[in-house]
Image (tube, grey):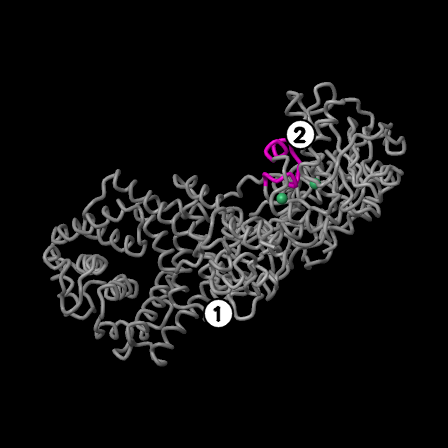
């Protein structure tokens, strides 16, 4: 009866707390355990979930995790899961999808380029890698589908301004802003501005700092989206004037406001609307940085991030001479390198230091850049290895992206928006069929892959390809014809039998793949590339994305399909066959099987 | 019922292989193991067209025999298949009395389609697959732990990478099955 304890010891491949995951998570108190020190029998959670749960823990970070999560604290009344971060089971239902998305973007962005192997090693070790990769693609696809992403303005209102800004900033880093539903984001952000301004767009001194920060972030988000000019010039004027009268409680807010002013009036941006006292304070801080650091200034301790913001403010406004911020920049650099030496960066802090250094005109030499990059990765690793914690706050995620961006090539971020699917291994659970993670699937065994022009390429999955084999002919719809989701889109013909492939989504046919009409053998041979069927321009409507399968959901569904197929030909006896790889043209291997009848059972969504 | 697991040699004469497997079985399952009388593969299981034997038919044949054993594990050099699948290493009733393992693709020196491997490696593969199929007969399904003998075996690398042992989780599930 010691199974719960025994199992828990190895939850993450190492001992956690006093070996029981329930203990480690605080769900079970030490007292509770001590009441029955030699067994778990007295444990209410053990009793409740029983042995079945303990077995499933093996797969906690494995592929079957969603189904088989045995922590299931969510099922224990009044308990929340200590590992809610890595659990993506409720991904679409949580109120903070922004955090998840950002985490994925952050990991994805850092997973390319020179740091790829380090990151991949870490994520593989925690078993998260496959899921992360698939989530990055999911995000990419959602973002690229724009309004189809299912994020409505009212959903966006659930996010904090910080999250909204983080989403927009992340999309900007990834160079896929153009495919965001910009109007929805703009609307949500402006809503935020008006809300904090009590119905008036002007900023008022009544704002307390958190509100001010929210408002400025919302405005900054609007600036990143480049939609500020679309708003009434008078409203912008009011905001601008409001800013001038604000007492900035911190240099960071002053810096934010400054960025905003430049965004509002890019052509005429010359003199600051920032309160003069703030500018003077910043200049003093920069000039006497050496002396002020580590002391108390205006009743507040001076911090490095504060100094970095001051450098940015004064340099943007020309409030100190060109070389006037060099000493402050050197101080920032020394501090940054000290942090790098520790190999554990506080990313928000490191990012602002770095921004300050760049603004001061002090250069990092190539070795220092490399060291910094490495420290970013190491701290990133540490951050995400700790219980695979995905609950990082958006600011630090943006900081990761931003810091990396400052020292490295921005094109890396753009690359993720157009990255290719990683090589997939043939999957035993799928009878050796492949299921790339970079696309959507339907229950009719079609896949859809968005392209940047908004069209969707449609094809059949590998499992269907194995069953279809070599067809004699394909009857394609005419380009321009309208498809209805779930209704026949095209017809496959073989040996006098025929079967329809149904449309995965409403839309108009843009293009059909002439190559497979000429050589139908391509269809089963290259189901995911050369064997694509047609390209459609999807019709946008509410719920178009519902019921589509992606990533882990797709794999789960396909596993049951593989099982269904096997059972179909298995007879009455329940058996397990090992070494199972689906035969090419599998149905042709069984005499007397009606090709069209079996296929209809799989291609009908 | 007898509490012995019986190995059934189906068109296989490799005594060393059979006794190696026989010696290994009791280290995992709490039963004696013996090598039973050899017999021919049932002709009804042969698919002339494919030149392979249909494993499920062999299982039916074994299960309906009157051999006195708690489990029957058939071993054969023949190539096995089940409909729609290209070939299989083995198949077992889940759970049930009978299981079968084929040495055909496990790297036998004298016969088979896999590149030949050295003898100890070949024997260890057959042991792993035998223990694995018996696991299914005791209700165990595939395990996510790559070192566990119950991990799904599809390609040789995965078979070679796993141990001959059940992981601790599968061992507990086996206990549950046997005491239920
Ligand atoms: Zn198996
Ligand atoms: Zn196992």
Residue A147, compared with residue B165, is above or below; it is below
Image-quadrant location for residue A270: bottom left
Residue A433 left/right relative to A340: right
Q: Measure how far apart labels 2 and 1 are at the Cα level.
A: 59 Å
Please tell me which residue is depicted at 74% across the width and 54% down the height of the picture: A604
Mark 2 lies on residue: B125
Left or right of A355, for residue B138:
right
Which secondary structure class fits the magenta region best?
Answer: loop
Q: Quadrant of the C terminus of chain A?
A: bottom right
Ligand 1 sits in quadrant: top right
Front residue of this view, candidates A213 and A258: A213
Residue range in magenta is B146-162
Callout 2: SS: helix
Look at the numbered disc 1 and give the secondary structure of its residue: helix
For the question of whether residue A268 can be seen, the reply is: no
Of all residues, the one furthest to the top in this rendering is B110
Could you tell me if residue A223 is visible in this image?
Answer: yes
Q: Label 2 crowding class (10 Å Cα cut-off): few <14, some 14-19, many 20+?
A: many
Residue A39, compared with residue A570, is above or below; it is below
Residue A483, how many percent across, how many down? 68, 57
Give how far across and how far down residue A309 sits, in percent.
22, 59
Crowd around label 1: few <14 · some 14–19 · many ≥20 (10 Å) = some
Q: Quadrant of the N terminus of chain A?
A: bottom right
Query: Dot 2 falls on which chain?
Result: B
Residue B120 position by quadrant: top right
Residue marked by disc 1: A153
């Amino acid at each position: 009866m010691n199974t719960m304890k025994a199992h828990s010891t190895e939850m993450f491949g190492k001992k956690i707390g006093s070996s029981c995951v329930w203990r480690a998570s605080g769900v079970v108190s030490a007292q509770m355990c001590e009441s029955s020190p030699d067994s778990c029998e007295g444990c209410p959670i053990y009793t409740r979930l029983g042995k079945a749960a303990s077995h499933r823990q093996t797969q906690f970070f494995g592929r079957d995790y969603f189904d088989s999560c045995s922590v299931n604290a969510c099922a224990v009344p009044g308990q929340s899961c200590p590992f809610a971060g890595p659990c993506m089971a409720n991904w679409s239902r949580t109120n903070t999808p922004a955090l998840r998305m950002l985490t994925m973007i952050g990991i994805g962005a850092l997973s390319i380029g020179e740091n790829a192997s380090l990151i991949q090693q870490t994520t593989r070790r925690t078993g998260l890698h496959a899921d992360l990769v698939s989530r990055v693609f999911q995000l990419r696809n959602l973002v690229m589908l724009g309004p189809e992403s299912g994020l409505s303005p009212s959903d966006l209102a659930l996010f904090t301004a910080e999250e909204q800004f983080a989403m927009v900033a992340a999309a900007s880093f990834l160079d896929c802003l153009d495919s965001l539903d910009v109007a929805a984001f703009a609307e949500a952000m402006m809503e935020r501005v008006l809300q904090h301004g009590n119905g008036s767009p002007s900023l008022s001194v009544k704002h307390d700092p958190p509100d001010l920060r929210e408002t400025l972030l919302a405005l900054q988000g609007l600036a990143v989206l480049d939609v500020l000019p679309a708003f009434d010039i008078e409203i912008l004027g009011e905001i601008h004037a409001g800013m001038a009268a604000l007492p900035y409680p911190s240099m960071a807010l002053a810096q934010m406001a400054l960025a905003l002013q430049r965004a509002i009036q890019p052509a005429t941006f010359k003199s600051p609307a920032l309160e003069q006292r703030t500018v003077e304070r910043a200049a003093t801080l920069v000039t006497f940085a050496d002396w002020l650091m580590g002391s108390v200034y205006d009743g507040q301790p001076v911090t490095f991030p504060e100094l970095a913001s001051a450098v940015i403010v004064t340099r943007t406004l020309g409030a100190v001479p060109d070389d006037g911020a060099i000493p402050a920049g050197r101080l920032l650099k020394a501090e940054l390198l000290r942090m790098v030496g520790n190999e554990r960066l506080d990313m928000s802090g490191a990012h602002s230091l770095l921004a300050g250094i760049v603004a001061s005109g002090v250069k990092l030499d190539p070795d220092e850049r490399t060291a910094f990059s490495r420290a970013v990765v190491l701290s990133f690793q540490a951050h995400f290895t700790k219980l695979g914690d995905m609950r990082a706050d958006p600011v630090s995620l943006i900081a990761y992206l931003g810091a990396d961006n400052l020292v490295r090539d921005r094109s890396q971020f753009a690359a993720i928006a157009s990255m290719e699917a990683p090589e997939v291994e043939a999957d035993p659970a799928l009878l050796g069929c492949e299921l790339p993670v970079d696309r959507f699937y339907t229950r009719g065994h079609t896949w859809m892959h968005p392209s940047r022009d908004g069209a969707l390429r449609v094809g059949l999955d590998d499992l269907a390809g194995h069953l279809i084999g070599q067809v004699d002919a394909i009857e394609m719809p005419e380009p321009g014809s309208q498809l209805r989701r779930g209704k026949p889109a095209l017809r496959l013909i073989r040996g006098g039998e025929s079967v329809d492939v149904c449309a995965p989504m409403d839309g108009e046919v843009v293009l059909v793949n002439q190559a497979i009409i000429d050589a139908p053998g391509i269809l089963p041979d290259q189901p995911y590339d050369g064997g694509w069927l047609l390209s459609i321009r999807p019709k946008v409507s509410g719920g178009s994305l519902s019921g589509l399968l992606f990533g882990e959901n797709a794999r789960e569904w396909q596993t049951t399909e593989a099982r269904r197929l096997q059972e179909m030909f298995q007879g009455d006896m329940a058996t397990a066959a090992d070494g199972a790889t689906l035969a090419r043209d599998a149905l042709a291997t069984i005499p007397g099987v009606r090709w069209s009848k079996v296929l209809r059972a799989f291609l009908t969504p | 019922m007898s509490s012995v697991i019986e190995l059934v040699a189906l068109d296989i004469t490799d005594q060393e292989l059979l006794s190696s497997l026989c010696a290994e079985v009791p280290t995992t399952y709490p039963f004696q193991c013996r090598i039973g009388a050899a017999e021919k593969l049932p002709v009804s299981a042969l698919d002339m067209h494919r030149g392979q034997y249909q494993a499920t038919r062999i299982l039916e044949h074994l299960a309906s025999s009157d051999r006195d054993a708690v489990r029957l594990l058939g071993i054969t050099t023949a190539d096995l298949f089940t409909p729609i699948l290209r070939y299989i290493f083995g198949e077992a009733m889940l759970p049930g009395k009978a299981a079968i393992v084929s040495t055909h693709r496990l790297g036998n020196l004298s016969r088979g389609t896999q590149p030949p491997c050295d003898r100890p490696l070949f024997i260890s593969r057959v042991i792993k697959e035998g223990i694995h199929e018996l696991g299914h007969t005791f209700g165990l399904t595939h395990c996510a732990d790559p070192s566990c003998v119950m991990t799904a075996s599809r390609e040789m690398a995965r078979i070679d990478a796993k141990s001959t042992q059940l992981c601790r989780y599968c061992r507990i599930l086996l206990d549950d099955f046997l005491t239920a």
